[in-house]
Amino acid sequence: MGDASGDHTSARQVAVLGAGSWGTALAIQLARTSRRTLLWGRDQAHLEQLKARRCNERYLPSAAFPDALDIEADLARAVRASDIVLVAVPSHALRGTLESLAAHLPAKARVAWATKGFELSTGLLPHEVARAVLGESVSLAVISGPTFAMEVGAGLPTAMTVASSDEVFAKELAESLSAHNFRAYTSSDIVGVEVGGATKNVLAIGAGISDGLGFGANTRIALITRGLVEMTRLGCALGSRKETFMGLAGLGDLVLTCTDNQSRNRRFGLSLASGDNIEAAQRSIGQVVEGVPAARAVREVAQRVGVEMPISEQIYRIIYEQVSPKDAVKELMTRALKPEDA
C-alpha cells in the first residue's frame, strides 16, 4: 500500500519534535504563518527555559517565539493534538524518535522530517527508516534545501524543497511553511532530495579542509563541482532523478554548506586543516557535526551499490584512517585522467 493521500484540509496544528536550532527555527517559521505549532524536545529543563523566556537562548537567542508557538513537554500530547508531525533531530536519533511517536500518532496524521543522512547502522535513507517504523499507511514527506537555522529564525528570505509521493501532503506542508519570507517548492523525488542532504555535509568538510589549507577559489569550486557529480552518481544509482541534484536540495544545499562558515561541517574541516585532531575539531564546534558519521555511511552505501566517489573516499580516509589532508589532495590530483562526464 502506498502513501495515503486522504482528503485533508489545511493543517490545523503541527508538532515539531526536536528543540535544537533547526527544530526551533522550523517551529518559528510555521508559527509565523499563524499555524498553531507545538515544539517538543527531550531535555525537560531546556523546554522550561524556552517556555519562560519565549526564545531559544541556547541556539537561536535573537529569534523571539511568535504567539502561535507553544512548548509541549509531553510527547504523547504533542503528537495526539497534531495532524502533521515534523521531526527535526539528528540522523542517529531519527529511528528512536519515530518509534516513540508511533504509539501516539492519530489515524489521519502525517509525518515529515528535516533529518539529513543515511542511518549509520543500516545504510537506509530517512524515508526507508520512517516506512519501516510507521508502516505503509502513513503519508511521509522530507524537508530539505539550502537553509541555516539562524537565518530562518531571523526571518531572512529562504527557499527549500518538500518532497513526498503524496502530492496533497507535499503541497499542504509547503503552504504551511510559506510566507513573505519563505518559499517552499514541492517534489516527488524523495530519494534524490535525501541523497543530497546525506552527502553535502561530507563534501562541506572537504571544502573546509581545502580552504583551511589555503588552496584557493579554484580548488573550492572544483571540489563543489566534482562533489555534485558524486552526489548525482550515488543518487541515480539509488533510484533518484538526475535533475533533482540541480535544484535546491542538491546544488543549492551543497554550495551553501561548502561556502559559509555557519556550516558546522565546513568549520570542522577548517579545524582539521589547522592541525586539530578529530576529537579537538568536534569539541571546537560544540554541536553535532553530521558529516563525520555521514562520511562512513556514504562510503559504505557507495561501495554497496558500486559507485565511485573519490572525494568522499578521501574525506573518509582523513577522518577514519588518519590520512593527512595534504596527502588526500595529492591522491585526488594524481588520479588517472578521464573524460569529465565519465
Image (cartoon, rainbow, N blue to C red):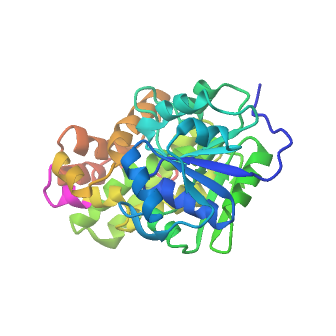
Residue at figure coordinates x 30%, y 50% from the top left: 332
Front one among 49 and 210: 49
Residue 273 is situated, as x and y percent measured from the top left of the image, at: 19, 59
Please identify the quarter of the rendering in which residue 317 is found: top left
Residue at figure coordinates x 52%, y 67% from the top left: 152
36 with respect to 59 (left or right): right
Q: Give the farthest residue toward the front.
A: 52
Front one among 280 and 70: 70
Residue at figure coordinates x 68%, y 45% from the top left: 84
Residue 89 is situated, as x and y percent measured from the top left of the image, at: 47, 44
Counting the numbered discs, the total is: 0
Give above or below for 266 relative to 191.
below
Residue 5 is situated, as x and y percent measured from the top left of the image, at: 81, 39
Residue 131 is situated, as x and y percent measured from the top left of the image, at: 62, 29
Give above or below for 174 relative to 135.
below
User: Magenta span covers which residues?
Assistant: 270-277
46 magenta-colored? no
Residue 290 visible in the shown view: no
Residue at figure coordinates x 16%, y 61% from the top left: 274
Residue 326 visible in the shown view: yes
197 with respect to 280 (left or right): right
Q: Give the farthest residue toward the right.
A: 7
Front one among 186 and 112: 112
Quadrant into which the N terminus falls: top right
